Image (spheres, rainbow, N blue to C red):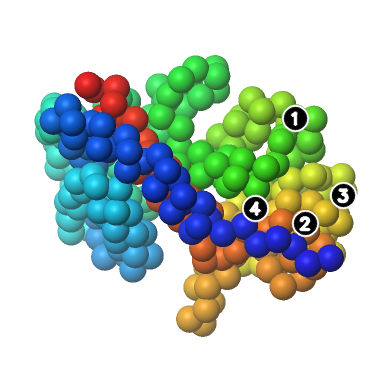
Amino acid sequence: MSARVISGKEVAEEILSNDLRLRVEKLKGKNIVPKLVVILVGEMKASASYVAQKEKFAGKAGIESEVRRFEDTISEEEILDEINKINTDSSIHGVIVQLPLPKHISVTKVLNSIDPSKDVDGFTPSNVGKLFLGEDTLVSCTPKGIMSILKSADVNLTGMNVTVIGRSNIVGKPVSILCQQQNATVTMCHSKTRDLNAKLADADVIIVAAGVPKFINGDQIPNGAVVVDVGIHNIEGKLCGDVDFESASKKASAITPVPGGVGPMTVCALIENTIIAAERSS
Ligand code: GUN
């Protein structure tokens, strides 16, 4: 079997053309231009590259974006002050703090200071709590992007076995909730899971967010499973995911590539969240 490769890049472009641009035009008709502010601390190459992708996609959608850059010596108070200014600026609809932050800054304190109505990363306790309760909220971007990718691939999760590898606040935990909301039976695996292969054996969908290059290979994937690879690693100048694409694509029925899979969908979800925040403000 050779898997269908699900292009997140193409799905994101479709959502942009068929949905996001139209919603932005509608807002502009009401004199509202959605605006996203990204707080970027330090000089991490990967963060700078992700932020550049966010700015580019924002431009394509016709929304405003501004990157506020700070040295990695910035104090926690200064970041909190900056967020406070953004919270009270009605021309800004969404704000994200690009992670990771330098060690002397508390991520929890910083994220908790964001006004939940502008929290387009969906990281604040209020938005995470609403997600948990199944209430309408700003859903964090990578899980939201994964759900869009599955929808675009016509995967109906009702009754399906979904195995999630990784229990992070950003991906594993929220995506497990979203899959349950769509009637899947979810198995959560992590670094202490015993006999991971047994947990994969009856999976219909496998979502891999382990943070380890090529952690999963084709031998561990049941025939016909749908594989979503959330990882991205630069190994000696070559990008790869948490899944060994070559062997996995021989077993899976559909698989997301790295790059060009989940990454563009995360960016697309962020811009959609900014549009949602602007729509709610109108
Ligand atoms: N760093 C890695 N992924 C993310 C993300 O989804 N949002 C933010 N703000 N930082 C990240």
Q: Which is nearer the N-term, disc 1 or disc 2?
A: 1
Specify the quadrant that holds the C terminus: top left
- Is 107 placed left or right of 88 in the picture? right
Residue at numbered disc 4:
228
Residue at numbered disc 2:
253
Of residue 102 and residue 22, the one placed in the foreground of this image is: 22
Between disc 3 and disc 2, the foreground one is 2
Instruction: Tell me how far mark 4 sits from mark 3, CA to CA.
Output: 16 Å
Q: Which is nearer the N-term, disc 3 or disc 1?
A: 1
Between disc 3 and disc 1, the foreground one is 1
For disc 1, does the CB lie below 8 Å from ligand 1? no
Report the amino acid beneath label 4: Val
Q: Quadrant of residue 55?
A: bottom left
Above or below 214: residue 29: above
Residue depicted at 60% across the width and 45% down the height: 152
Q: Quadrant of residue 172?
A: top right
Residue depicted at 46% across the width and 32% down the height: 139
Report the amino acid beneath label 1: Thr
Instruction: Tell me how far mark 3 sits from mark 1, CA to CA.
Output: 19 Å
Residue 122 in sight from this viewpoint: yes
Marker disc for residue 36: none
Above or below 80: residue 224: below
Q: Which is nearer the N-term, disc 4 or disc 3?
A: 3
Above or below 251: residue 119: above
- Is 234 placed left or right of 29 in the picture? right
Residue at numbered disc 3:
201
Q: Which is nearer the N-term, disc 4 or disc 2?
A: 4
Residue depicted at 70% across the width and 41% down the height: 155
Q: Which is nearer the N-term, disc 3 or disc 2?
A: 3
Q: Secondary structure at mark 4?
A: strand
Residue at numbered disc 1:
158
